[in-house]
Amino acid sequence: MTGRGVLRHRVRRLALCGLLACAVASGALAQAERPYRVGVLNEALAANHPTVEGLKAGLRELGLAEGRDVSFEVRFTQGDATATRDGAVAYAKAGVDLIFTSSEEPTRQAMAATTSIPIVFTLVRDPVAVGIVAKPAAPEGNVTGIASLSPELTAKRLELLRTLAPAARRVWAIHEADDRITAAAVASATSAAKQLDLRLVARPVGSREDLARALGEIRRGDAILAPDRGRLDIPGALLDLSLAARIPAVFTASFYVGYGGLASYGADYYAEGFQAARLVARILRGARPQELPVEGADKLDVAVNLKTAADLRLTVPRKILLRADTLRR
């Protein structure tokens, strides 16, 4: 090969190497710019659950915009156990970057489906008692999140109910028979009821038929202490009865007050999602779940629906008006 031919050959090789380098760089850049994929798994009736809306708002504030930096695939299973399991398995097979769950069952199903994809949970009442983590300060494996602290507030809810409906003497605490966390919370509320001169009727139910029979025993003049959500959607059934029969009820979250419930005390769903965004953002940016302790809910709200109180002919005391974080009119 002549000198001029060697030169041309070297130029072609350099040009080819340059093209290959550009292609590799472009591929790496495209990969880096691909939005993080977050699989959302909850038992809600619709995709726009408050925890999901809070998560999106929290991530936006942290510089992760939907569409540009992060994409969401939302599976709301309406409490169907098979759909929840299938959704978790689908996310594991798809290799999403993170799974965001609400409530215990979706979290357990996500944990069963993958031990490598990070999981951030919300609306878990007691993550130790339900076996999600052993040590909240040092969570093991691929799971961390926000604990709602709901069982610890049961006595306070009973006190709120007594203040809002002073004429009521019998309070119904209907809960799922296999929900030992709520059962323990109701047991502790029984002693608080005695101090408040109330009779607490604890009624565990195992099916929708059991629930229907229990609802049929509630009478005018009674009051209702609603449990957390679950597979039977007892809070939803109690909300419907409360509004139809004009029976005062106190719920675990302001979500129900927004739909007409008299009052609530507990973690706000939207705020819990917003708080969880900090954990999600840190994991997407490289942190490991076991480096991030489980957090208790930052925001506990007292919410009162003033319109419902008026419909029930109840007077909301000034001390409750001043204490309430949310007043619905």
Image (cartoon, rainbow, N blue to C red):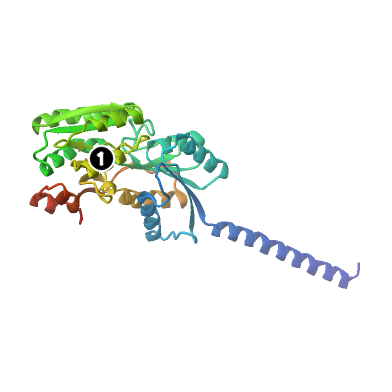
* In front of the other: 224 or 125: 224
Residue 245 point in image, percent of width and height: 21, 41
* In front of the other: 317 or 38: 317
Which residue appears at 46% of the width and 59% of the height? 66
User: What quarter of the picture does the C terminus occupy?
Assistant: bottom left
Asked where in the image residue 120 lies, by quadrant, the reply is top left
- Above or below — where is 246 with respect to 305? above
User: What quarter of the picture does the N terminus occupy?
Assistant: bottom right
Residue bearing the label numbered 1: 241
User: In the rendered view, does 55 fall on the left or right side of 296?
Assistant: right
* In front of the other: 315 or 229: 315
Q: Amino acid at mark 1?
A: Leu
Residue 84 point in image, percent of width and height: 46, 38
User: Label 1's element?
Assistant: helix
Residue 19 point in image, percent of width and height: 71, 65
Which residue appears at 15% of the width and 46% of the height? 312
User: In the rendered view, does 149 fall on the left or right side of 312?
Assistant: right
Which residue appears at 31% of the width and 41% of the height? 236
